[in-house]
Amino acid sequence: MTDAEREELEQQAGEYALGTLAGDERRRFEARLAADPALRAQVEDWQRRIGPLAEGAPAVEPPPSVWWRIEAATAPPVYGAGDALPLRQRIARSLYLWWCLSFWRWSALVGVGAAAALALYIAAAPVAPPAPAYAAVLNDAQAKPAWLVTADRAGRRIAAQPLAATGADARALELWAIPDGGKPRSLGLLDRASVVARDLPADLAGRIGSGVAFAVSAEPPGGSPTGQPTGPVLYQGVLLAIAR
Amino acid sequence: MRFARRPDGPYPAPAMDTSGPDRLTDLIAAAASGDRRAFADLYRATGAKLFGLALRILRRRDWAEEVLQEAFVNIWRHAGAYRPERGAPFAWLATIVRNRALDRLRRERPVVPLDDAPGRESWADPGKNPLDLALASAEARRLKACLDELDGPQRESIVLAYYEGRTHEELAARFAAPLGTVKSWIRRGLIRIKGCLER
């Protein structure tokens, strides 16, 4: 490489760091960058030089849902990244999942007495809840599982149940569904002691497979007065498909 | 919103915490070792400023939100790659956000009208150097002094390119100057900044 070529490249490194290279010039430079560690170091030098300009940007508070999504995307997996795990851990996770979902079995069992009585009057068998196809474990700030949210395959109906005692508190717990890139949607208040089932808004049902996040915020009794979370978010997690 | 006031929770305060680059360096190092609380503090300290940076370049809230989200997921995964000798911690974070914003802008550019969006007016004065010395780090103060040494068009084109992600062609249109002239403003300006910072 001649001195002139070297100088040209360093100049381009500066322009690339500044962001003024576009189109073919930018693509050619990036192709070169991928293969040239010395050029990458030059770009980094330029970024170090002009980077402090960022301090001049205005502070604009991002909506809370951005942090929820960051936290959901970086949270330690409870289950869901199972394929990458050794078999033993995968089994342990399956058992945990089964334990979580065994609620449905217990609720069915509890229902047997009532159902038997009911069956004396009607011939129809009690309808068991559909098997959940999606589940989200909502963790607290210490990454401890606190709620299990499950959804049926069509994503029309969700159920939320406590996994651990959440403590007595005058505040109401409100459940929110947060679609990717969207605003939180209220799914109503939770019951600290038992399962609640809710219909998911139709437009969310269609996106059930694309990583809807759930969060629980503390709200005044009766729920958020604004239609958006107003209190701290206590629990959150992302809905994942349950492998069959 | 009351999120900002939750004492133990990771919700953003509206402004950047300028209590010092050392604190940001420590938070990045702690996040690299898997400390989620430090990561949340890092977001709280820098998220609003970085969101402002992305918003300024993209001029669309939905894109800026996505860019901020992707950038912080990246920061969590690559916090271990940060070395203080590679620059001030905030500049490092900003580079990650800005690169993502520029990628997005270059990808979406054909559908974005370049007409000035609302909210730009306080930034539109190209002669204005937006670095606020009262809040700036030592690196930023040095850079500001070097920018002040540049000729007007050199400084203005570099500042606009940085904060608005403008390309050579767009800057040429904006200044109603030939493309080659704008390129040389930027090149000479960058060379002089480098020389000034090395003095």
Image (cartoon, coloured by chain):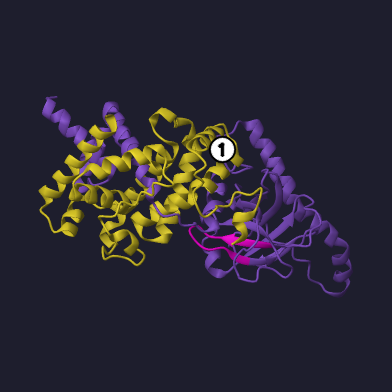
> Which quadrant would the N terminus of chain A be assigned to in this image?
top left
Q: Along the line of sight, which residue is nearer the eye, B136 or A100?
A: B136
Give the residue displayed 34% in from the left and 52% down from the top. Answer: B130
Q: Along the line of sight, which residue is nearer the eye, A50 or A188?
A: A50
Q: Is residue A142 above or below residue A203?
A: above
Give the residue displayed 62% in from the left and 66% down from the top. Answer: A186
Residue A76 visible? The answer is no
* Image quadrant where residue A77 sits: top right
Give the residue displayed 13% in from the left and 25% down from the top. Answer: A3
Give the residue displayed 55% in from the left and 59% down from the top. Answer: A208
| Relative image position of residue B94 (x, y in whole percent) | 40, 44
* Image quadrant where residue B92 sits: top left
Is A157 on the left or on the right of A182, as rendered? right
Tell which subunit mark 1 falls on.
A
Residue placed furthest toward the bottom? A121
Q: Is residue B43 magenta?
A: no
| Relative image position of residue A98 (x, y in whole percent) | 71, 46
Shade representing chain B: yellow
Q: Which residue is mark 1?
A: A83
Shade representing chain A: purple
Q: Which span is picked out in magenta? A: A174-186
Q: Is residue A178 magenta?
A: yes
Q: Along the line of sight, which residue is nearer the eye, A160 or B119?
A: B119
Is B8 on the left or on the right of A192, as rendered? left
Near mark 1 (Cα within 10 A), the count class, few <14, some 14-19 or many ≥20, is: few
Q: Amino acid at mark 1?
A: Asp
Is B20 on the left or on the right of B153, as rendered? right
| Relative image position of residue B41 (x, y in whole percent) | 57, 44
Q: Is residue B1 above or below residue A4?
A: below
Q: How many marks?
A: 1
